[in-house]
Image (cartoon, helix red, strand yellow):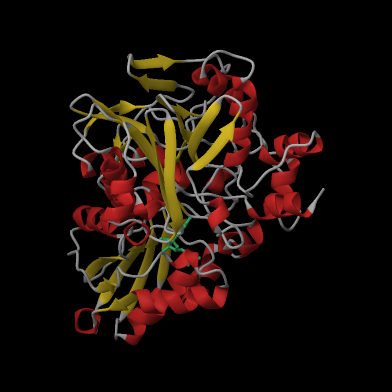
Amino acid sequence: MNSNFDNFAKEELHEECGVFGIFSDGTINPAYACYNGLLALQHRGQESCGIAVADEGVIDYHKNMGLVSEVFNNAILDSLSGQMGLSHVRYSTAGGSVLENAQPLVMRYVKGTLAVAHNGNLTNAVEIRRTLEERGAIFQTTIDSEVICYLIARERLKCHTVEDAVARAMQQLEGAYSLLVMSPRKIIAARDPHGFKPLCMGKYNDSVVFASESCALDACGADFVRDIEPGEIVVVDNDGIRSIKPDFGDKKKAMCIFEYIYFARSDSNIDGVSVYEARKQAGRILARSFPVEADMVVGVPESGIDAAIGYSEESGIPYEKAIMKNSYIGRTFIKPTQKERMKSVRIKLNPIANMVKGKRVVIIDDSIVRGTTVDRIVTMLREAGAKEVHMRISSPPFLWPCYYGTDIPSRGELIACNHTIEEITKLSGADSLGYLPVESLHEMIGYAPVGFCDGCFTGNYPANITLEMFKGKERGGMEFKDKNN
Ligand code: AMP
């Protein structure tokens, strides 16, 4: 293994990203549509972003580190003219946060140019890349998306169309990918056969728009048409829209349940389920499962608020906004070290002291990962004079890492792996603690017929995890649960 490969295997185990693309009918400027779409998807990644456009067969792009509003201005957007475009916001963990890993990836090969934007993690990228490198392939990034590019380019030499090449590449890929691919004359959207990551399609007049979440369609004025189905490839070019459904065998549908709990924006609908409704429902379930006498229900902004409203509705305890969030700093997890994370939580959230003084407070957050936030929140509320602090969490305890693209770290870092709920309650200083029961996840999404992945709560992984990936995240020698399909 060379050092580049080492970096790839070690660092690039998770990506939480957003993708947006458009094939324009001429009534909407693709670069500006991408810009608006990316602004709406900024919560999915704040490290880097980029837009690629295709103009009469030529692909041009701009990408950089930073927020969408920092990376683009009018002059840059005006320079990106074309009939279609695709774009990307990226979030990764420490180490891989460099410009070379920013997307879209734009690649020149013997058949022309390809641009690719990818959300999700492949679970066999390490193996595919090793095989390719041993045969002389050269990679310029340390992200698994480049493996996808390489496979598409290679397959394109053996078949007639890019969509066929995408279909052939998909037969070799395992894990999570919601993908946008642009060749000079068409744009292709594809979702892995399990459908781990969201991807939907909309229309603006006769322009066709693709986005990770429906909130990005709203942002550019497009109407939602439908979700891309797991294993489906949708092609748009001057001849119209075509759907291809290659045979991937019988794969379990496995939409990431954490999209509903935390990751997606509340105003999005994913696979027919309103994210806001799911979060409120989680709050109602918590109110029934862990009732308590209290004066107010408070949500940790932003992702705890919807569940807090649900808890309040169900319990009859008034909802109060008693914590302020500074919206101008990034998500806590972006800071690479534990010490840095502690600092940024304190800067980010602040209680409204006279609201909580002398009160019994039910406080709801969406999840506990390492335990940093819960600790800070309880301390903050106590320091502000709260009489009682009852913590409710609108997800089950995280017991397993995620291999498909959500930043759920190794088991050694997951507090629920190393402590009982009683111990976590004590460590956090809360008077009580209740997690959403894992068996309530179906009820949370209103029993909608959405097959979902809850591997991070149950250890039941719907798609193969290779030993290489498993070792990268496992600590403590726990049993390796692996369920194929
Ligand atoms: P922790 O402080 O380590 O226990 O993390 C819990 C907090 O991080 C919660 O307030 C969540 O809203 C947030 N969070 C949970 N999962 C993620 C994730 N994958 N990426 C970024 N933030 C997250």
Image quarter of residue 121 = top right
- Residue at the image position 42 percent from the left and 61 percent from the top: 66
| Residue nearer the viewer, 357 or 210 | 210
Question: How many callouts does the rendering have?
Answer: 0
Q: Is residue 276 above or below residue 217?
A: below
Image position, residue 479 (x, y; %)? 73, 46
* Vertical placement of residue 393 versus 260, above or below: below
Q: Is residue 132 visible?
A: yes
Q: Is residue 255 left or right of residue 479?
A: left
Image quadrant where residue 270 sits: top left
Please report the residue visible at 19 percent of the width from the left and 54 percent of the height from the top: 313
Query: Is any part of residue 463 visible from this angle?
Result: no
Q: Tell whether 455 sits left or right of 29.
A: right
User: For this rendering, which residue is in front, 29 or 365?
Assistant: 29
Q: On the rendered image, what quadrant is the C terminus found in?
A: top right
Q: Nearer the viewer, residue 78 or 325?
A: 78
Name above or below for residue 216 compared with residue 414: above
Residue 462's x, y, as percent?
A: 58, 33
Q: Residue 185: x, y in percent?
A: 41, 24
Residue 22 at x, y percent in the picture: 32, 33
